[in-house]
């Protein structure tokens, strides 16, 4: 038996080793990952971001080169510190302080010694860089804005956050990414694909050569340039008109769904979000919860549209054949639709579709709506029929445009009322506010603009979009897909004629532009706020929708001015000016222009508070063709890091 | 004529395994040395070439020579160890080398073969009966004399190897309780480091009570059991003292890391952590020859010497590790098989020593590399870089192969 001890020990011991090795190599796979972290260093080659142009090829957003001076403290040889400091225009104290910091971070890893030098500053240093062993430079590309407007359309560039890094393996800590606007929605097109180079590291974290002879390395793919559908001149003009007001303007080319202008006010100069002041400025914009400069009112401001909605009420009445063009209702400064219930109206006398529209007669549209709902025995069915007509204009849901923010708005259905009145008993008169665009109906400016584009097209629309052209690729097919409404083409003609007379004899007769046939509609949206815990009614929001020219529409527009009052007071003039600017490239109604430019609603907004900080940063485009260049050194981003 | 018969009688299984291990060892040294400035693989190549004349000399010497001069060889070997205290060169805190120019030689690598010869010679006397306490003491003296000289160098790794002689002696009749004592000592030691002493004493008490009442009535000896318990308790209590006061800090660290008490990946735990990462990243079939990222990066310290197995694990994967372990186990079992076949007690004991020594190196080394044994400097036979080691193991093995080849012709 004694013979067996050593062989047994050998076999048991060998089995023990095999099991442990099996565990390490096959079962536990964390070591593989650790090994890669240990031994492979990845270097990225960042491509230049694509340029952004407007619809006419005007350059809006470009890039600027900037250079970081990097240092690896351990590789530092005795250099001429005095010369070094003079070249970079820093003091000896700065040098000592920064170097100490770099050493604390790591003596053998690169640190940013001096960030964001511009070309001319860097040129002087570049000639001498060889003399300063241990220093090298890292080129970076930052956004350079050629215009001082359109910040809400462009969005901005920022560092990716941890959450996204965890979700999207493309991004690494310190990478830049587009946020908001087209920078976000076309991030993948604009950014290109960064190149990756793998290096074998040794235990000191030094590169000792290319990993597997560069087998897995990839070359950076340049970002693509894009053209926006935006008309730079119109956009700029819109922002100028909105100075000292809050609100949004959306202009669409009806034939294509292209967004010609997307204005939100207040806005800011996009270049303040590039450079050393970036994070300070962003914080200021972000925390201004009252003026909300980062909130795109053109896309997000959701209100009961008011009178412009009468267009749909009328069209649906015609389509459902509950009225025809001649049907008229008597208006007595209003309309008593139920016992003790009275809807006020400024009109008087008989109203049919035509004068109903240009006088914006509540009585007429309330009656049309009542007939529409009464057409079917069940009001719930009738409401759904009505709702489907409205929704065929692209309302009540996200529109599917290519900007990252939006609101659904609201178009009520029978379900909505089942929820509000669980015991039933509701009828046409209960929901009569819908007829004049109040009650449960909610719309955003871009939805209003799209509605006008659809009317201009007499029954179809293309999904609004901001992208015109991507270099080397085609735009999303859904933007060339025609959406046809449930309303017959023939019913649009009388409606458009009524809208045209809004300018001739109706509510906007003072806003006519000689030589341009505009069809439009005024509107007001009631709104409330809480001041000191009390619900207070504020001045109505001024709303205006229009398209022009009447017979060959080239622009459809929706304007919302918060607390601007009656539709024709502020929104209307802005619509006329925008239309003239786009169609004529110059302004003949200079009286209107001066009036609008001089209107300041700041006093009205002061009641809401929070104006002072906002004033400091809300920027407004200057009416000068030469863009004032900020000194380059200040434009550089302060937060980029070597990755 | 004589050469031909030797050729015919040599055990080619052992020689083929030996050659395979040496060649594989060199390939892995080649891979791991690419990360360092020194061309260790070139030196090792020279060492390997020099084993060829060495093998011819060993096989050429008359088989009886080793038995005849075993005592003298042992004496010379002991002297070479003593000489270290006077002329030895200190490398990395260990005074275990003789330096001749840039060339260094480590006598402890040769002392194992000499001790084996001496022990075999002593036991081959038919008068020796290991049941006698005197004989036990004499046999153990032969084993522990070199240990006493190696320990203070200090080279605990080499000293540890000598514990395998206990198993050899057991095979030749040493009472079983020596083995049990050794085994229980190690067990108690580890348990005491892991648990509080009082728990270990409780466990010991329970085990002794169970053994006491399970054994036959006639064998029961309450006094012996009580003494046994007292000794064990005393040992357990002294372990803490020994560990804290006799052991050096770096020894304590090594045990603490093994037992998972300390986690310090950049400091003392770095070696084991890095070698586990290297081996663990190999997967089923490894990253391929010269493709090991850890090996290339030089993350594993001492990779070409004591940690050479990490290269096997990383570049050849589980498959390669299995092949290497299988080759070693095959060699050990083959040598034991041959030893049991020997006609003389001398060559049988010697063969047993060869298998035991090679196995202990193999186990301690790989177990350390894969993190189930404390970090202790023991080379992997035939694999690790180093001339002294390679030649020491070659001499050890080929003396036995010569004896084995001789057995037919001699008598």
Image (spheres, coloured by chain):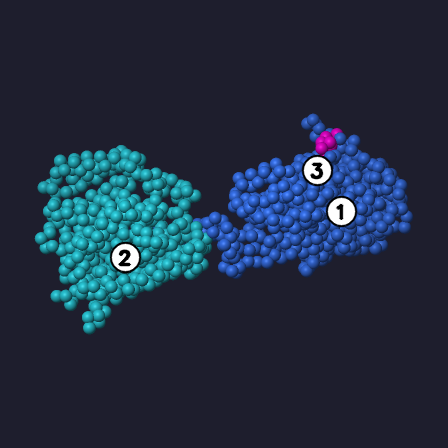
Chain colours: A blue, B cyan
| Residue found at x 64% / y 43% | A83
Q: Nearer the viewer, residue B110 or A62?
A: B110
Do discs 2 and 1 share a chain?
A: no
| Residue found at x 79% / y 40% | A242
Measure the alpha-carbon separation of dots 3 and 1. 21 Å
Q: Is residue B224 left or right of residue A582?
A: left
Q: Nearer the viewer, residue A522 or B213?
A: B213
- Residue at mark 2: B393
The region drawn magenta spans: A607-614
Task: Please tell me whether mark 2 sits on a helix, a strand or a loop.
Answer: helix
- Residue at mark 3: A292
| Residue found at x 72% / y 57% | A469
Q: Residue B201: percent from the left, percent from the top?
A: 24, 35
| Residue found at x 40% / y 41% | B263
Chain letter belonging to callout 1: A
Q: Residue A75: percent from the left, percent from the top?
A: 54, 47
- Residue at mark 1: A147
**Cβ–Cβ below 8 Å for labels 3 and 2?**
no
Which numbered mark, 3 or 1, is in the foreground of this view? 1
Q: Is residue A612 magenta?
A: yes
Measure the alpha-carbon separation of dots 2 and 1. 81 Å
Q: Would you place residue B98 above or below residue A283 in this image?
A: below
Q: Nearer the viewer, residue A389 or B398?
A: B398
Q: Residue A560: percent from the left, percent from the top?
A: 77, 41
**Snapshot quadrant of residue A18:** bottom left
Q: Nearer the viewer, residue B91 or A100?
A: B91
Chain letter belonging to callout 3: A
Q: Residue A490: percent from the left, percent from the top?
A: 81, 55
Q: Is residue B183 left or right of residue B374?
A: left
| Quarter placement of the N terminus of chain A | bottom left
């Amino acid at each position: 038996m004694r013979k067996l001890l050593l062989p047994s020990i050998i076999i048991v011991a060998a089995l023990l080793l095999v099991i442990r090795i099996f565990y390490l190599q096959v079962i536990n796979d964390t070591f593989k990952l650790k090994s890669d972290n240990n031994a492979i260093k990845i270097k990225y080659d960042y491509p230049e971001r694509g340029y952004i142009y407007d619809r006419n090829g005007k350059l809006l957003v470009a890039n600027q080169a900037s250079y970081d001076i990097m240092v690896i403290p351990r590789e530092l040889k005795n250099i001429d510190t005095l010369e070094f400091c003079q070249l970079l225009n820093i003091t000896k104290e700065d040098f000592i302080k920064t170097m100490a910091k770099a050493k604390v971070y790591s003596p053998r890893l690169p640190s940013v010694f001096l960030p964001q030098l511009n070309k001319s500053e860097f040129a002087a240093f570049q000639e001498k860089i060889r003399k300063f062993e241990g220093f090298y430079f890292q080129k970076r590309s930052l956004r350079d804005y050629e215009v001082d407007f359109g910040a809400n359309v462009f969005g901005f560039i920022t560092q990716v956050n941890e959450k996204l890094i965890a979700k999207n393996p493309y991004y690494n800590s310190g990478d830049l990414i587009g946020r908001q606007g087209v920078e976000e929605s076309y991030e993948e097109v604009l950014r290109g694909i960064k190149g990756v180079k793998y290096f074998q590291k040794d235990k000191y974290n030094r590169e000792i050569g290319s990993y597997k002879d560069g087998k897995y390395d990839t070359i950076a793919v340049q970002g693509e340039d894009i053209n926006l559908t935006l008309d730079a001149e119109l956009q700029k003009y819109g922002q100028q008109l909105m100075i000292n007001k809050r609100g949004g303007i959306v202009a669409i080319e009806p034939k294509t769904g292209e967004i010609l202008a997307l204005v939100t006010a207040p806005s800011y100069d996009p270049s303040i979000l590039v450079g050393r002041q970036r994070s300070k400025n962003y914080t200021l914009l972000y925390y201004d919860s009252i003026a909300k400069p980062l909130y795109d009112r053109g896309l997000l401001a959701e209100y009961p549209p008011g009178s412009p909605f009468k267009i749909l009420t009328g069209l649906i009445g015609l389509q459902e054949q509950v009225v025809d063009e001649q049907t008229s209702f008597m208006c007595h400064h209003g309309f008593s639709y139920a016992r003790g219930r009275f809807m006020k109206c400024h009109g008087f006398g008989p109203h049919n579709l035509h004068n109903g529209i240009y006088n914006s007669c509540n009585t007429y549209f309330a009656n049309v709506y009542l007939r529409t709902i009464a057409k079917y025995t069940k009001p719930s069915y009738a409401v759904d029929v009505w709702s489907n007509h409205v929704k065929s204009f692209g309302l009540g849901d996200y529109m599917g445009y290519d900007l990252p923010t939006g609101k659904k708005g609201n178009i009520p259905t029978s379900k909505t009322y089942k929820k509000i009145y669980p015991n039933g008993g509701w009828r046409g008169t209960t929901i009569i506010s819908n007829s004049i665009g109040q009650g449960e109906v909610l719309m955003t400016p871009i939805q209003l603009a799209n509605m006008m584009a659809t009317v201009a097209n007499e029954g179809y629309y293309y999904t609004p979009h901001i992208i015109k052209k991507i270099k080397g690729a085609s735009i999303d097919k859904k933007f060339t897909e025609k959406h046809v409404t449930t309303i017959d083409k023939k019913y649009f003609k009388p409606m458009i004629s009524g809208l045209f007379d809004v300018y001739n004899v109706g509510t906007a007769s003072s806003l006519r532009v000689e030589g341009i046939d505009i069809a439009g509609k005024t509107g007001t949206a009631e709104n409330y706020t809480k001041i000191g815990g009390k619900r207070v009614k504020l001045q109505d929001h001024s709303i205006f929708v229009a398209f022009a020219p009447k017979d060959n529409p080239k622009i459809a527009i929706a304007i919302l001015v918060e607390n601007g009052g009656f539709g024709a007071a502020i929104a209307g003039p802005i619509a006329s000016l925008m239309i003239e600017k786009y169609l004529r490239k110059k302004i003949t109604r200079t009286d209107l222009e001066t009036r609008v430019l001089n209107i300041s609603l700041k006093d009205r907004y002061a009641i809401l508070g929070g104006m002072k900080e906002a004033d400091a940063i809300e920027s407004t485009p200057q009416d000068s063709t030469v863009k004032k260049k900020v000194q380059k050194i200040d434009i550089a981003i302060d937060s980029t890091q070597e990755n | 004529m004589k050469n031909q018969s030797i050729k015919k009688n040599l055990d080619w299984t052992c020689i083929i395994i030996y050659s395979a291990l040496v060649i594989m060892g060199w390939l892995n040294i080649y891979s791991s040395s690419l990360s360092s400035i020194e061309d260790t693989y070139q030196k090792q190549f020279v060492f390997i070439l020099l084993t060829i004349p060495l093998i011819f000399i060993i096989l050429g010497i008359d088989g009886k020579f080793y038995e005849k001069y075993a005592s003298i060889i042992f004496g010379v070997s002991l002297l070479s160890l003593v000489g270290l205290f006077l002329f030895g060169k200190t490398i990395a805190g260990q005074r275990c080398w003789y330096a001749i120019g840039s060339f260094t030689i480590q006598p402890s690598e040769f002392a194992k073969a000499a001790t084996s010869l001496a022990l075999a010679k002593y036991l081959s006397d038919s008068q020796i009966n290991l049941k006698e306490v005197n004989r036990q003491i004499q046999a153990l003296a032969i084993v522990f004399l070199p240990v006493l000289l190696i320990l203070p160098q200090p080279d605990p790794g080499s000293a540890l190897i000598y514990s395998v002689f206990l198993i050899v002696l057991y095979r030749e009749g040493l009472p079983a309780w020596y083995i049990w004592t050794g085994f229980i000592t190690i067990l108690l030691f580890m348990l005491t480091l892991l648990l509080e002493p009082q728990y270990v004493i409780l466990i010991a008490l329970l085990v002794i009570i169970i053994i006491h009442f399970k054994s036959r009535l006639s064998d029961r000896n309450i006094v012996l059991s009580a003494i046994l318990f007292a000794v064990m308790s005393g040992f357990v209590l002294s372990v803490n003292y020994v560990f804290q006061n006799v052991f050096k800090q770096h020894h304590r660290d090594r045990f603490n890391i093994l037992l998972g008490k300390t986690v310090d990946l950049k400091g003392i735990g770095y070696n084991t952590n890095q070698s586990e990462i290297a081996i663990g990243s190999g997967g089923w079939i490894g990253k391929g020859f010269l493709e090991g990222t850890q090996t290339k990066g030089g993350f594993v310290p001492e990779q070409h010497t004591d940690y050479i197995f990490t290269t096997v694990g990383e570049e050849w994967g589980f498959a390669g590790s299995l092949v290497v372990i299988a080759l070693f186990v095959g060699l050990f079992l083959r040598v034991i098989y041959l030893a049991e076949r020997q006609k003389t007690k001398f060559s049988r004991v010697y063969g047993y020593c060869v298998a035991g020594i090679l196995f202990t190196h193999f186990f301690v080394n790989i177990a350390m590399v894969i993190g189930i044994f404390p970090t202790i400097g023991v080379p992997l036979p035939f694999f690790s870089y180093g001339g002294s080691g390679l030649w020491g193991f070659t001499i050890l093995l080929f003396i036995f192969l010569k004896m084995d080849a001789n057995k037919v012709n001699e008598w």
